[in-house]
Amino acid sequence: MNKLLLLLTLLVIMLPLQAQEKRIFVTKDANGVLVFSDSPQPGAEEVNLTSRPNVMESTGTNLPARKPVEVEPFKIEIAQPENNGTVRDNTGSVYVSGRITPMFQRGLQVRLVVDGTPLSEPQNKATFILRDVDRGEHTLQMELFDQSGKLIATSPVTTFYLHRASVINPN
């Protein structure tokens, strides 16, 4: 059995070295062991070696070029109140929340601009509570700043209408 494996291994190793026009013959000896030869013997069968099933073509060793990681720009928008929406609150309280994509990161800060005037210093969250807002039409906009204080995104202007009971007509 070991001789057979040795012969087959030698045959596989020698296959690439053989020219295509050479012919190989196989016979069995008195002990039943396969004998490979390049000259025909009585009772030998020709082995067809036109295909190389166990030999793979070489491939390039170069790794594919990596695409540079594209940093998605930040986007900010006002989620509440809705644009052109109506807020009904007799105390004049308005809850404002923003949405930042991609995910809000540490060090980013948000500032709310109400009717064109910044509400306060930037803060590290995108929710605000406005108190004692006058009735009528108001505009909101959010500004997003990075760690160094540079403005990196602004939301579209959102208009909302606050309805409060009137001093003149409380109904």
Image (cartoon, grey):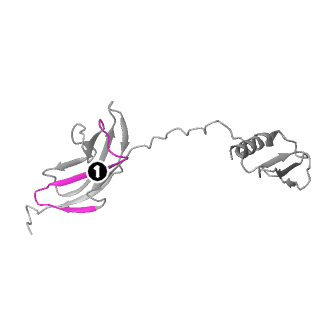
Left or right: 164, with 126 as reference point: left
The residue under label 1 is: 98
Residue displayed at 17% across by 50% down: 130
Q: Which of these two is toward me, 74 or 12?
A: 12
> Quarter of the image holding residue 120?
top left
Task: Pinpoint residue 115: horizontal percent, then vertical percent.
Answer: 26, 48
Image height of 66 relative to 156, above or below: above
The range drawn in magenta is 85-107
Compared with residue 103, is residue 61 higher up or lower down, i.e. above or below?
above
**Residue 89: x %, y % from top left:** 14, 60
Can you see residue 49? Answer: no
In-front residue for pair 162/147: 147
Q: Secondary structure at mark 1?
A: strand
Specify whether residue 16 is in view: yes
Residue at the spot 29% in from the left edge and 59% down from the top edge: 82
Magenta segment includes 4: no
Q: Residue at x 73, y 46 (%)?
A: 4
Could you tell me which quadrant the C terminus lies in?
A: bottom left
Q: Nearer the viewer, residue 146 or 168?
A: 146
In the image, what residue type sits under mark 1?
Gly
How busy is the neighbourhood of tag 1: few (under 14 within 10 Å), some, or many (20 plus)? Answer: some
Q: Nearer the viewer, residue 41 or 18?
A: 41
